Amino acid sequence: VQLQAYGGGSVQAGESLRLSCTASGYIFRIPTMGWYRRFPGKERELVATLGDDGSANYQDSVKGRFTISRDSAKNTVYLQMNALKPEDTAVYYCSADFTTISGEYISHVWGQGTLVTVSS
């Protein structure tokens, strides 16, 4: 199983970006999909996660500005980022837990990072 992320870029403060991440492979179920970010010199931190039961979890600093959603038919998770701030500048990573069609549970599969740059 693997994840492919899209949608990073450079914007001005206050603008919006949407990230997407598509999973592929022999997938039976994806219990959780999410987004993390890494600031230079820092550890990766959670931005938002979304369970296949619809339960969402957000980091406090993005609540009200970012929205996570998923299209289960496409095995894709989205992160709509509105009212972006310079402090949102980071490399964003998608992640997911999988159950494969052979019944194997694989946790914390990571996609490649995508850079989001917000200038003031």
Image (cartoon, helix red, strand yellow):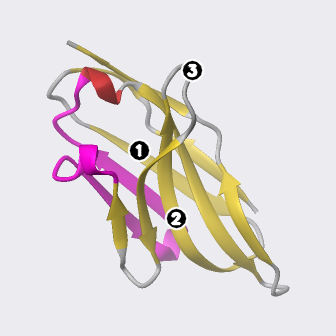
Q: Earlier in the sequence, mark 1 or mark 3?
A: 1
Q: Residue at x 42, y 85 (%)?
A: 53
Q: Mark 1 against mark 2, which lies toward the viewer?
A: 2
CA distance for labels 2 and 3: 25 Å
Looking at the rendered image, the quarter that the N terminus falls into is: bottom right
Q: Earlier in the sequence, mark 1 or mark 2?
A: 1
Which of these two is toward me, 18 or 92?
Answer: 92
Circle 2: element type: strand
Q: Mark 2 against mark 3, which lies toward the viewer?
A: 3
Q: Residue at x 65, y 53 (%)?
A: 3
Q: How many marks?
A: 3
CA distance for labels 1 and 2: 13 Å
Q: Residue at x 68, y 73 (%)?
A: 98
In the image: residue 81, left or right of residue 54: left
Which of these two is toward me, 33 or 22?
Answer: 33
Circle 1: element type: strand
In the image: residue 6, left or right of residue 99: left
- Identify the amino acid type marked 1: Leu
Which of these two is toward me, 106 or 28?
Answer: 106
Looking at the rendered image, the quarter that the C terminus falls into is: top left
Q: State the mark number for residue 33.
A: 2
Q: x and y percent of residue 65 in the render?
A: 19, 46
Q: x and y percent of residue 70 in the render?
A: 41, 67
Badge 3 density bin: few <14, some 14–19, many ≥20, Cα 10 Å: few
- Identify the amino acid type marked 3: Gly
Q: Earlier in the sequence, mark 2 or mark 3?
A: 2
Q: Which residues are magenta?
A: 59-85
Q: Which residue is mark 1?
A: 19
Q: Choose top left, top right, bottom left or bottom right for residue 23.
A: bottom right
Badge 1 density bin: few <14, some 14–19, many ≥20, Cα 10 Å: many
Q: Which residue is mark 3?
A: 41
Return the residue found at the far top.
120
